[in-house]
Image (cartoon, rainbow, N blue to C red):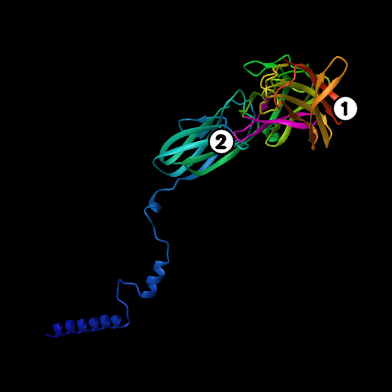
Amino acid sequence: MRFHFMLLLQAILLLSLLLGCGGSGKRPGRASDSDAEETDTEERMTAEDMIPRAVLVRAEFTREVDHKRFKATGDILEEFDPTVEVIYLVGKLKRVPTQARIEVRWFRDSKRDPLLISDIHGSGRFSFVADFRPVEDEFIPGSHTARIFVDDAEVGGASFTIAGEDPFAAGVRVKKTTVSTRVTRKMKPRQPARAFREKTKKLHVTFDIENASPETEVTVRWLRNDDLFNEQEVSVAPRGRFGSVIESPAGLPSGNYVVEIEANGEAKAQTRFVIGEVSDGPAVDLLALGLALGGDNLPTVEQTAFKVGHPAIKCGLRFLDVPPESIVEVQWIQLEEDSESIWHTTRTAVTAGGSGTLSAVWEANGSFAEGQYKVVVLINDAAVAEKEFTIE
């Protein structure tokens, strides 16, 4: 009976202790309000956090490896001679996801796109060897980087150098610029020259390109007597021979020419040449008559005989090197046995000067009179060109 009483007393004391804990406002196994707030501010784990993240442990370069054990057997190097046949990257990863896709992308630091991509497969703790061989006979000098990607996410890399002068450090190069009247299919000039005959209709400039990139912009600029008259954009590859052409059905005007080649806005090459005889002052090197004019102010069909019933006779001319504020005058003159009669005159102001084309029109206002005629062009009152025609 006494034994049972002692057990009952111990049970009462234990119950009192439990009730005392409940009176403090806390329950075993449950956080207080302040504890809950503190827990909510902590970073919560997600399903993505449970995915293993690959880590690069080591990446080294060498010329000799043990392919079975994925280890370097030669010296670890940071610089190589351009003549070496192969460069090995010996690397080690950890926490690589199963069936992950691993790539080593080899870059020349002066270029945006990789030179080579090596695919490697593995899982878990992973050692690997990737090799890099020259695209051509030798490696190109300069700084390079091997970057390691796991499932397209970069995890690290390492850099090395090919000894020698980096040809890309100076940027795009333009070499062997020539001007000619004809070229082959491979853009090689035929009989390049620095002087061409008067009325030459077509000229090619060809040149070699080296060290270009996909972003390289090449511009060919043609200038006559220091005035720009043609500009072309040329698409180029990293290296090769390329060209540009100018032409005029009526013949290119005589004068001193310069063709300039720019790459990314920087002048890279310049070649001078001459067409015909260079004049010392204003001149008209092309004068033609017809019934209709094209967009270049020159007749679409040139002729020197007209009918009395034609509604108008039109003249197109190309003037060269006139001073600013010049006046170009066109006179239509009938030729008689002992005299000349001016039937019509037009005057055009060339405010900016320089070279260009213009037109003049003589309208019949009924019908023309039969006879022998000529058109005379004057620049600032000095006769510079004339052409005879007939009306029948």
Image location of residue 346, percent across then percent down:
78, 31
Does 216 appear in magenta?
A: yes
Q: Looking at this view, is 211 or 180 the one in front? A: 180
Residue type marked 1: Ala
Image location of residue 259, percent across then percent down:
74, 27
Residue 163 visible (yes or no)? no
Does label 1 or label 2 sit earlier along the sequence? 2
Q: Looking at this view, is 201 or 378 the one in front? A: 378
Left or right: where 317 falls relative to 25: right
Q: Main secondary structure of the magenta part?
A: strand
The residues tagged by marks 1 and 2 sit, at their Cα atoms, a distance apart of 63 Å
What label does residue 268 carry, if any? none
- Residue at left offset 39%, top offset 52%: 48
Q: Please tell me how crowded label 2 is: few (under 14), some (14-19), or many (20+) other residues with Cα within 10 Å.
A: few
Q: Which residues are magenta?
A: 207-234
Image location of residue 375, percent across then percent down:
79, 22
Residue type marked 2: Asp
What label does residue 382 carry, if any? 1
Tag in front: 1 or 2: 1
What residue sits right under mark 2 in the picture? 113
Q: Please tell me how crowded label 1 is: few (under 14), some (14-19), or many (20+) other residues with Cα within 10 Å.
A: few
Image vertical order of residue 80 relative to residue 1, above or below: above
Residue furthest out toward the left:
1
Circles 1 and 2: CB atoms closer than 8 Å = no
- Residue at left offset 52%, top offset 30%: 131
Which image quadrant is residue 266 in? top right
Does 111 appear in magenta?
A: no
Image location of residue 200, percent across then percent down:
74, 18
- Residue at left offset 50%, top offset 30%: 66
